[in-house]
Amino acid sequence: MTAWAAAAPPRTVDRTDTAAFAASVLIVLIFSQAWVFPLLGEHGDPAQSGLVRVLFLPAYACALFLLALQPVSFLLALMRQPLLIVLMAIVGVSLLWSVEPDQTVRRMVALYATTLGGVVLGVRYSWPRLAEVIAAAFAILAVGSLVVAVAMPSIGVMHVLFPGAWRGLWIEKNALGGIMTLGVCALSAAALLNPVRAKIWWPFAALALALILLSTSKTSLVALVLGGGMLAFVWLVRRGPAMGVAATWLAVLAIGMLAGLAFFASDLMFGLLGKDATLTGRTRIWAAVIHQIRLRPWTGYGYSAVWSETGNWGPLAWIIKEAGFKPEHAHNAWLEQWLGLGVFGLAAFVLFYVQTAVTAIIGVFRTAGAYFFAPYLIVYTLITLTESVAVTYNDFRWVIFVAIAVRLALPRED
């Protein structure tokens, strides 16, 4: 055996796999948009910047590169996601009734490229490797946020609103807190799924946690508790059937208690979140959006068209008048789909989400990959209630969600 080992050729690194891993991390980094705020500043408008649009092109190219490596696997995986295909088709058809067709067609192409990035990540990687791809990107984002806040506090720390709160590479503190919450989940999962490299990932998870605390975002802390609770739940389920049953009953009890608290003690919940009853003006946006939905409930106004609409009597003008300010989006992923894509688009997204959620619930009891997808999905679901992070072009949270949905639909690894 010793002679065979001596005669064996030295192990070489697969250059294609290395290039694919680098391309995958680059996709997540570019779609994180962490570079937009440092590039444009507080008063820049990314939607109107040609430079910003061009800088997303490398992510599209990386997605095409990964597609070229596994075209057959990509097609087979896509066949397992008919609801995603239907959703993308409705996005395309919405061009026919869009109030801003030029904006819809441009953003539709960007959405297709963004979704492609998620599909190819889900196809290429096993759960442990996928967790490391995402974790590597979050580690870079965490280090970048730390460096910017310490070395360039004029950029990385807020001074007017919430003075002293860290915002890192993003425009405000809640963005840093929310993204680092997802980062803690991904980095912890990478450590648990790859014990050999756990010493690499745990320190970055601690850094992400520190950034959440420095952001002073109470909403992110609540999301972190939910994500951490789900991570603990998966750990208990993995201990054996008896422990799994006990953990499931405890989870049901905890969910019931949270629902009761939200229903009967909403003021206490708002206080914990540091919000008022309007959720920082979001309820006014939702009311205005619902009024516009009622005018065109079946078709909507076209994919991502409302928020760039310029007419004095169009839907955006009425939303601004009713909300009292100009919102950038609906601040709710579900209302966003209904507003842009109508009833059928909303139904397609709901069904796609439910399919993913059901397979994830089953997967918690069947695969160790639940360390990654279960905490991410619960935090992502919470974010969808107050932010438009679904069916979103050039957004890494949608990329990761699609990757998880695709991976869950593929045959089990273990």
Image (tube, helix red, strand yellow):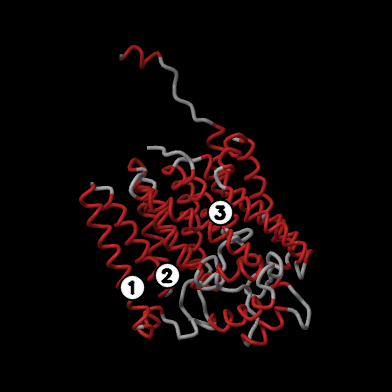
The amino acid at mark 1 is Leu
Q: Is residue 319 left or right of residue 178?
A: right
Give the vertical position of 388 relative to 414 (above or below): below
Q: Is residue 199 left or right of residue 151?
A: left
Give the vertical position of 150 relative to 72 (above or below): below
Element class at badge 3: helix
Task: Mark 1 vs mark 3: give the one in front.
Answer: 1
Measured Cα–Cα span from mark 1 to mark 3? 29 Å
Q: Can you identify the residue that label 1 sits on?
A: 258
Q: Can you identify the residue that label 2 sits on?
A: 220
Do the CB atoms of the residues marked 1 and 3 lie less than 8 Å apart? no
Q: Earlier in the sequence, mark 1 or mark 2?
A: 2
Measured Cα–Cα span from mark 1 to mark 2? 17 Å
Element class at badge 2: helix
Badge 3: few (under 14), some or many (20 or more) residues near its Cα, within 10 Å?
A: many
The amino acid at mark 3 is Val
Q: Position of residue 51 (x, y in %)?
A: 73, 60
Q: Earlier in the sequence, mark 1 or mark 3?
A: 1
Q: Quadrant of the C terminus?
A: top left
Q: Quadrant of residue 44?
A: bottom right
**Residue for point 69% across, 78% down:** 295
Q: Can you identify the residue that label 3 sits on?
A: 399
Is residue 160 at all visible to an observer of this figure? no
**Residue for point 58% across, 42% down:** 79
Measured Cα–Cα span from mark 3 to mark 2? 20 Å
